Image: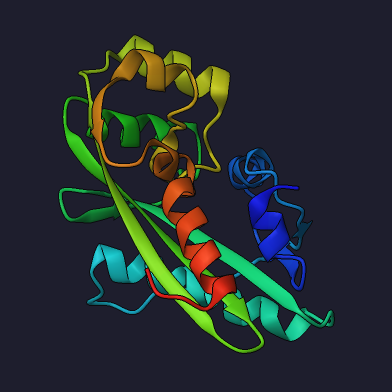
């Protein structure tokens, strides 16, 4: 048995996310979990730092889902990923033109991808965040149009998925966790989850 699943036997694991990337990453870890999508208002108070925004939103998702959970022994996972460029948070694009505009802003520069993660059980809650710096090559207008038209990244913060064509052709380098850019910092998540279920500090 997967060592982590052994530790999780006393829990009913729930992922509150529609993200196919997060679902895929948890499956790759070999975890058994239920998917409980959540729709929440993604607004946040003014004056928060980018890190605080990611943490606020993942905790907001947890607060929205917890009243709906009827199963005993649950362990709820919520996460939110934001993209910060030149001290400005870039949301998911609203349409094709917005996606093209966002990618033109990211072209030839560095941005930060920040994921907040919240683990909640009946007894306790743990929140952490991870930051990855992504450096883009200069993107031509034709490259941006091709990517947006073919991959339609409208459900992705920053209007791109690093695991797709643009990650191969457009990303010069990253500093930090690659999986964090996909939506979940898997190595950190694994260690934090193990510590959470074992009641230890890391």
Q: Place residue 51 in its image quadrant.
A: bottom left
**In this rendering, is residue 56 above or below 181?**
below
Colour logic: rainbow
For the C terminus, give its image quadrant.
Answer: bottom left
Q: Is residue 69 left or right of residue 139?
A: right
Q: Nearer the viewer, residue 30 or 119?
A: 30
Q: Looking at the image, which residue is at 52% across and 81% down? A: 125
Q: Is residue 153 visible?
A: yes
On screen, 72 above or below 108? Answer: below
Q: Residue furthest bottom?
A: 123
Percent position (x, y) of residue 137?
22, 19
Extreme residue toward the top, this view: 142
**How many numbered marks, from 0 up?**
0
**Which of 10 and 102 lies nearest the eye of the viewer?**
10
Q: Is residue 43 visible?
A: no
Q: x and y percent of residue 82 in the render? A: 38, 54
Between 2 and 157, the one lying in front of the other is 2
Q: Position of residue 79 (x, y in %)?
A: 52, 61
Give left or right: position of 125 versus 111.
right
* Residue at 55% in and 23% down: 151
Asked whether, in this view, residue 2 is left or right of residue 185, the answer is right
């Amino acid at each position: 048995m997967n060592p982590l699943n052994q530790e999780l036997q006393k829990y009913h694991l729930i992922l509150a996310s529609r993200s196919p990337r997060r679902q895929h990453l948890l499956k790759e870890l070999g975890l058994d979990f239920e998917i409980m999508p959540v729709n929440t208002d993604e607004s946040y108070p003014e004056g928060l730092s980018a890190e605080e925004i990611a943490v606020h939103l993942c905790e907001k998702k947890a607060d929205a889902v917890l009243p709906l959970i009827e199963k005993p022994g649950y362990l709820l996972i919520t996460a939110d990923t934001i993209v910060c460029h030149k001290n400005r948070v870039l949301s998911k694009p609203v349409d094709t033109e917005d996606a093209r505009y966002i990618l033109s802003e990211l072209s030839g520069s560095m941005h930060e991808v920040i994921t907040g993660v919240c683990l909640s059980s009946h007894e306790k809650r743990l929140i952490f965040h991870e930051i990855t710096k992504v450096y883009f090559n200069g993107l031509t207008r034709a490259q941006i149009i091709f990517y947006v038209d073919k991959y339609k990244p409208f459900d992705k913060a920053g209007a791109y998925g690093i695991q797709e064509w643009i990650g191969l052709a457009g990303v010069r380098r990253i500093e930090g966790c690659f999986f964090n850019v996909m939506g979940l910092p898997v190595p950190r998540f694994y260690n934090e989850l193990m510590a959470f279920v074992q009641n230890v500090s890391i």
